[in-house]
């Protein structure tokens, strides 16, 4: 805030019998202060003009009372001299209040009421006050009387609006939230250093598959897990270049139908594949991701390639920055083959190039903004992908596309270089063929990102070493009972469970938090009318207009309610280590994201589609469930998911995108 001049004024009022008949003015100090809390002993506002002349005139024209000694009246102010005035009808009295700025005054002591000069009201002032009075009902704040509303209108015009504009100029000239992060940081940890014996640099002990043989069929190769492919590369049964060829060929073949790819990074992919092959030839093996192709959701920045955020407005945008998660994957030797579809501005599956489809049911869409990563992994177009979630963008498309994903504990993966919706909700996570692949990915990309204030070293234990027979796991009524029964047979103590909390506004808390934060990151976008270009007018445009009239006080109240919810959810885990429940229940999705708890989504089977055409179809509707754990306990959810998948094969099934059935006609490009 710009400094103001602060002056201390002493007025000495003398007896009529004194030889001096005028006031002596002594200006003691002139220091720089901001408009913080100071004591002021005279109230009111002085008309524009000379401070000295006005004070002197008031003293000379007012009748002076007889005093045996001069009386001093100190007046220290943190506002500019133009805001100073004095109306001293009784100079022996003093008045004190706290002055935060011109429009925030709190009486501390009142020894005398001083009349405030009436300001001449213009038609514009009256009109503004009337409009504000009517508008206040939309803020649930229409309880002010007319004089207070006039004061509010004047304060907004003279203080609030200039401050708003100055702040926007400082931090909101660019959209996307890539710069100037908020200092209000959410820490999802419950403060119980459960994993205190774990070092932040300790890696998991990954399983090995020594007898993996290269399949003769390229499609079989495309559907192998990370650990299987890693073994093929490590034993030189396949080169990274060969594997990259297979993956790029599939991306080009199936993307015209799935609409899951924004940009193929073909040149970069071959460069990275060559580097991986050269390193291996020199005897340097970087780990299970060495030479493995993958895709990134297109809100994650990669230099020299478009980062479109799925939006018409930004479809030609190239960001000269490397996202933190991309750098982590580079260091592990992974090969980026594609920027995959994000729903426009990370909302749902609609983007500027179309709408991403579900490989298991090509006539429906994938849902969720991590649409491209989920559809591409499900269809065998990439072995794994990195997506993001603010409110369901990982869990929904993973469940719809019948694929495994991990939404990690909030703060586990750094977000530098990633478009931001909400700094206290956004999370990056892996979408893979199996829970064990998810474990490898989260081990690779987790860690403290120095430029992401919310990221931290989440000390996860090794999920491959968790003794699940020592765990007590609850299950909600919405849980898939096959998962409950399988885990019970594996030695887990399974108990019926209800998630109890008294906060009834879970969904609205999430919407208020997400929408206000999003608007802060796309303020310019809305102000300049780019929301009219948005691909789905019933989505962000409507929500962000509503967010424009959410007051700061109500945003803070939502965060306080969020804190209450977190404490109540925490109490539910006193008797259990994890719980199983529906992965796509909206209330549970909102709750999980607000609290910051991890969940692993696992496919649990299939059922017939509802719109079976004459002649039949091979299309299927996927079923899934979620395994939830407390913050920083992702390894527990992963261990349980791996245990389930060790004796089931739902996650190994392949969608029928080449053979949807005799009753369906899906056009594919020729080979």
Image (spheres, helix red, strand yellow):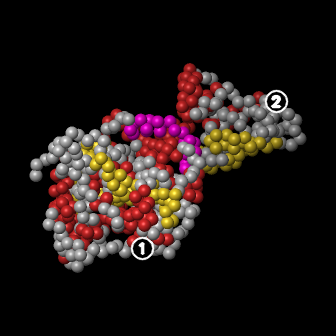
Indicate the secondary structure of the residue bearing disc 1.
helix
Residue farthest to the bottom, as pictured? 283
- The answer to whether one can see residue 626 in this image is no
Residue farthest to the top, as pictured? 123
- The answer to whether one can see residue 511 in this image is yes
Q: For the point 69% across and 41% down, which residue is it? A: 106
Q: Nearer the viewer, mark 2 or mark 1?
A: 1
Q: For the point 28% across and 48% down, which residue is it? A: 620
Q: State the image coordinates of residue 464 (x, y, percent, origin top left).
A: 39, 71
Q: For the point 67% across and 26% down, which residue is it? A: 118
> Counting other residues with Cα less than 10 Å from the Cα at mark 2, is it few (<14), some (14-19), or many (20 or more)?
few
Rounded to the nearest angstrom, the CA distance separating label 2 from label 1 is 91 Å
| Boundaries of the magenta span | 539-562
Residue behind mark 1: 465
Q: Which of 237 and 650 is in front in this view?
A: 650
Residue contact at pointers 2 and 1, CB within 8 angstroms: no
Residue behind mark 2: 63
Image quadrant in which you'd find residue 10? top right
* Magenta stretch holds residue 546: yes
Q: Main secondary structure of the magenta part?
A: helix
Left or right: 436 as drawn, with respect to 61: left
Q: For the point 45% across and 43% down, which residue is it? A: 515
């Amino acid at each position: 805030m710009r400094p103001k001049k602060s002056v201390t004024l002493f007025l000495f009022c003398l007896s009529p019998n004194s030889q001096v008949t005028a006031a002596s003015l002594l200006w003691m100090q002139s220091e720089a202060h901001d408009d913080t809390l100071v004591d002021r002993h005279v109230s009111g506002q002085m008309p524009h003009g000379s401070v000295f002349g006005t004070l002197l005139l008031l003293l000379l024209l007012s009748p002076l009372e007889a005093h045996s000694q001069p009386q001093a009246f100190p007046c220290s102010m943190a506002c500019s001299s133009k805001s100073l005035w004095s109306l001293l009808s009784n100079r022996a009295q003093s008045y004190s209040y706290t002055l935060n700025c011109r429009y925030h005054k709190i009486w501390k002591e009142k020894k005398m009421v001083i009349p405030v000069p009436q300001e001449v009201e213009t038609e514009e002032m009256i009109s503004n006050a009337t409009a504000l009075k009517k508008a206040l009902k939309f803020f649930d704040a229409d309880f002010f009387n007319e004089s207070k509303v006039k004061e509010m209108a004047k304060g907004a015009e003279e203080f609030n609006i200039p401050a708003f504009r100055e702040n926007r100029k400082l931090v909101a000239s660019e959209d996307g939230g890539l710069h100037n992060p908020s200092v209000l940081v959410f820490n999802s940890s419950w403060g119980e250093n459960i994993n205190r014996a774990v070092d932040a640099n300790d890696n998991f002990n990954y399983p090995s598959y020594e007898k993996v043989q290269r399949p003769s069929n390229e499609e079989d190769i495309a559907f192998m897990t990370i650990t299987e492919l890693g073994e093929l590369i490590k034993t030189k049964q396949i080169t990274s270049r060969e594997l990259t060829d297979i993956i790029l060929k599939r991306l080009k073949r199936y993307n015209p139908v799935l609409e899951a790819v924004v940009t193929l990074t073909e040149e970069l992919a071959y460069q990275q594949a060559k580097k991986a092959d050269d390193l291996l030839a020199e005897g340097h093996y970087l780990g299970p991701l060495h030479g493995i192709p993958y895709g990134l959701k297109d809100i994650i920045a990669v230099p020299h390639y478009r980062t479109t955020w799925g939006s018409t407005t930004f479809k030609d945008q190239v960001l000269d920055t490397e996202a933190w998660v991309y750098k982590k994957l580079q260091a592990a030797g992974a090969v980026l083959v594609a920027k995959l579809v994000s729903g426009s501005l990370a909302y749902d599956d609609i983007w500027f190039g179309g709408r991403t489809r579900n490989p298991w049911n090509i006539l429906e869409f994938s849902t969720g903004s991590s649409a491209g990563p989920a559809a591409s992994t499900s269809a065998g177009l990439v072995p794994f992908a990195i997506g993001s979630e603010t409110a369901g963008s990982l869990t929904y498309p993973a469940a719809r596309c019948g694929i495994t994903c991990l939404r990690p504990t909030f703060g586990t993966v750094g977000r530098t270089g990633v478009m931001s919706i909400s700094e206290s909700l956004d999370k990056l996570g892996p979408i893979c063929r199996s829970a064990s692949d998810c474990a490898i990915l989260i081990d690779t990309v987790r860690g403290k990102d120095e430029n992401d204030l919310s990221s931290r070293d989440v000390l996860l234990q090794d999920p491959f070493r968790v003794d699940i027979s020592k765990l007590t796991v609850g299950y909600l009524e919405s849980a898939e009972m096959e998962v409950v029964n399988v885990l019970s047979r594996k030695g887990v103590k399974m108990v019926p469970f209800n998630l109890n909390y008294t906060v009834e506004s879970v969904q609205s808390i999430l919407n208020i938090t997400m929408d206000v934060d999003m608007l802060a990151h796309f303020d310019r976008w809305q102000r300049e009318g780019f929301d009219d270009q948005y691909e789905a007018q019933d989505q962000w445009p409507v929500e962000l207009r509503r967010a424009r009239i959410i007051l700061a006080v109500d945003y803070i109240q939502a965060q306080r309610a969020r804190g209450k919810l977190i404490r109540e959810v925490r109490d539910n885990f006193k008797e259990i280590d994890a719980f199983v429940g529906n992965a796509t229940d909206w209330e549970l999705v909102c709750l999980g994201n607000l609290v910051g708890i991890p969940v692993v989504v696992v496919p649990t089977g299939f059922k017939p589609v509802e719109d079976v055409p004459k002649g039949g179809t091979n299309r299927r509707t996927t079923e899934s469930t979620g395994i939830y754990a407390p913050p920083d306990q992702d390894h527990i959810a992963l261990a349980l998911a791996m245990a389930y998948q060790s004796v089931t094969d739902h996650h190994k099934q392949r969608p029928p995108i080449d053979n949807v059935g005799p009753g369906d006609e899906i056009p594919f490009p020729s080979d």
